[in-house]
Amino acid sequence: MLELVIVSTLNGVLYGMLLFLMASGLTLIFSMMGVLNFAHASFYMLGAFFGYQISKFTGFWVGLVAAPVVVGGIGALVERYGLRNVHRHGHVPELLFTFGLAYVIEEVVQMVWGKLPVDYRVPAILDFPAFTVFGTNYPAYKLFMLVISVAIFIALLAVLTRTRVGLIIQAALTHPNMVAMLGHDVPKVFMLVFGVGTGLAAVAGVIAGPALVTQANMAGLLGPILFVVVVVGGLGSLTGAFAASLLIGLVQTFAISLDVSVASVLQAAGIDAAPSGGVLGDLWTVTIAQIGPIIPYLLLVIVLIARPTGLLGNREA
């Protein structure tokens, strides 16, 4: 039991911080611009593939820096020449635009790199066990992913709350005319924010690519859970996204590791009250591990019913 708790906690925190790396960029874009970017997971996928391609010629560390810059530049161009023209027509055209963009990016990735997974590997300098827990080796690369995620959270929080740049960015959303009168280029601020947000998604892709499978459908695998994180944490709340990422990461990891059903619990207690057949009989034997993938979405429904603004969101957001 102790091994299960410790290993699942480590894996849950790591998975949660990976979710935060992706959700931080989406939260930044929404809180500053009011745009819910459905193509955000696609920029995460682009980061992984660009990181892989760059690392083939220059190594992993150059790719870690260069890929987010390239993807952030693409994101800035998307905002400048696409989203900016759509923004004035309201939120529905924005959603449709980013939804279509996600499909375009996926098709382009399949045309360039194919549908099969690419050989994106952990850098040799981090390819060793950092420590051993109950006979299980914990890779140093996972610790590196955790450190990068925490560092980005602290840096984002500091920039947005402690610097002049952060104040200008936040003011540009609520009082754009006043910010413009003070001499700041509000459209450029929005373009830079969108670029930084997509760049953060690319960082997640670069560091997650070697640990997970880098393939053309990776955006679809993590995209839905990303919006669960943002909504549960509270739209526009960076600290809410951080808390929701850890919560969902831990809940889903522990759920998947528990091969327990109602029938098994009753049998262990010496009670034989489970239905013997039919639909109810099947439901009685469903384990927590089997329903683990849908637990975050159940949590989303509960949060929307009990607190529609999310854990740390507010009604204005």
Image (cartoon, helix red, strand yellow):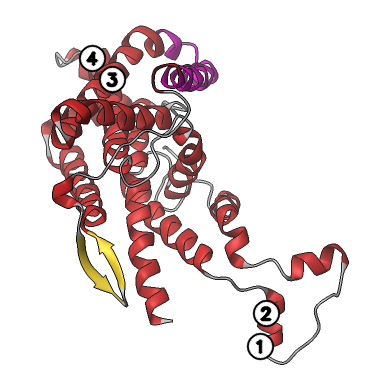
Name which residue lies at 27% across and 64% down: 138
> Mark 2 sits on what residue?
264
Up the image or down, 239 lies above or below 285; here it is above
Mark 2 vs 4: CB contact within 8 A: no
Q: Residue 260 lies in what quarter of the image?
A: bottom right
Q: Is residue 106 magenta?
A: yes
Report x, y in % for residue 96: 54, 18
Report x, y in % for residue 237: 35, 43
Q: Secondary structure at mark 1?
A: helix
Q: Amino acid at mark 2?
A: Ser
* C-alpha gap between disc 2 and disc 4: 59 Å
The mark nearer the N terminus, 1 or 4, is 4
Residue 190: assigned label = 3
* Of the pair 212 and 231, the residue shown nearer to us: 212
Query: Is residue 32 among what the camera can see?
Result: no
| Magenta segment boundaries in residue numbering | 85-110
* C-alpha gap between disc 3 and disc 1: 59 Å
Q: Amino acid at mark 1?
A: Ala
Up the image or down, 84 lies above or below 201; here it is above
> Mark 4 sits on what residue?
188
- Which class describes the residues within 10 Å of circle 1: few (<14), some (14-19), or many (20+)? few
> Mark 1 sits on what residue?
268
- Which class describes the residues within 10 Å of circle 4: few (<14), some (14-19), or many (20+)? few
Name which residue lies at 58% across and 64% down: 289
The mark nearer the N terminus, 2 or 4, is 4
Mark 1 vs 4: CB contact within 8 A: no
Q: In terms of secondary structure, what is the magenta stretch mainly?
A: helix
